[in-house]
Amino acid sequence: MKDLPSTGAVRWAGHAWVGPGIGIFHGRAGHQDWHHHQAHQISAGLDSPVLVETPLGIQTGSAVFIPAGLPHRLSANRVLSIYLDAVSDEARALCGSETARVIEIAPGDITPIIEALREPGHTALQVRAGVRQSLQLSDPPPSDPRLTTVVEALRSGQMGRDEMAALVHLSPSRFSHWFVEQTGLPLRSYAKWLRLTQALQYVAKGVRLTEAAHAAGFSDSAHFSRTFRTLLGIDPSSALAEVDLQES
């Protein structure tokens, strides 16, 4: 893997919002190591092109789409990045792709997202509506209702694979294959990402990192930090030092 132009010790700074099925960062991009998260990412440069390195090469343009699970590093100045949970309607409405690609997003296209986030007391539904408008997403086909049941069970954090398989009347082995068919992701990888986003929602409410990690199902803060670095390429204390994290 080739190296990106170094961003030095530049820290991430700006605003981030996290809610069910969606996360958004708006501000200055900083240093990150190679990482891969279980959400589709769209990053649009606000004052310069975005450069994304993957094992398959480099993509650079006004905006870049990064599919869930793909190892990557991003280099940019100011960006608006959208993270879409792989089982969300918005993710399913995106054209499927297993590789990063440049997409066309004009500066004015992201206005609905910024306006939604600036609205006092905005809800996750308002933010998601802004994302759908900005990305010009059509309505996806109806999802398998069994997937909704499984995701709700995962969010509760109280069921293992065998119990979830029984919920949808599949054998455990068949259930694992079915989940990959539905989401493109292994169950364990998706569950790890879900716990991370739940921890961040607690942090956004003002809960300290250690307590947020425990509440989301991590064994301890070190476990949470290792997962954070693996999925986002930076340790949580550095990532959040100059980022105002809010819940949507």
Image (cartoon, rainbow, N blue to C red):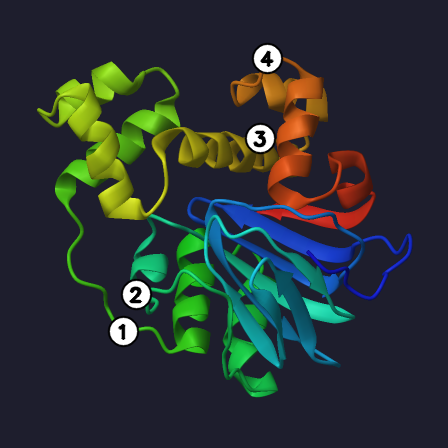
Q: Which mark's residue is nearer the viewer, 2 or 3?
A: 2
Q: For the residues labelled 3 and 4, say whether their Cβ atoms are less than 8 Å apart.
A: no
Relative to residue 112, is residue 40 depicted above or below? above
Query: Mark 4 belongs to which amino acid?
Result: Ser
Pointer 2 or 1: first along the chain: 2
Residues tagged 2 and 1 counted as in contact (Cβ below 8 A):
yes
Give the CA distance from mark 2 to mark 3. 26 Å
Q: Residue at x 51, y 33 (%)?
A: 198
Which residue bears the numbered disc 3? 199
Is residue 100 shown left or right of residue 190?
right
The amino acid type of the residue labelled 1 equals Ser
Q: Residue at x 34, y 27 (%)?
A: 154
Residue 219, numbered label: 4
Return the disc, 3 or 4, that comes first in the chain's sequence: 3
Of label 3 and label 1, which has the lower sequence position?
Answer: 1
Where is mark 1, residue-wise? Answer: 138
Q: Earlier in the sequence, mark 2 or mark 4?
A: 2
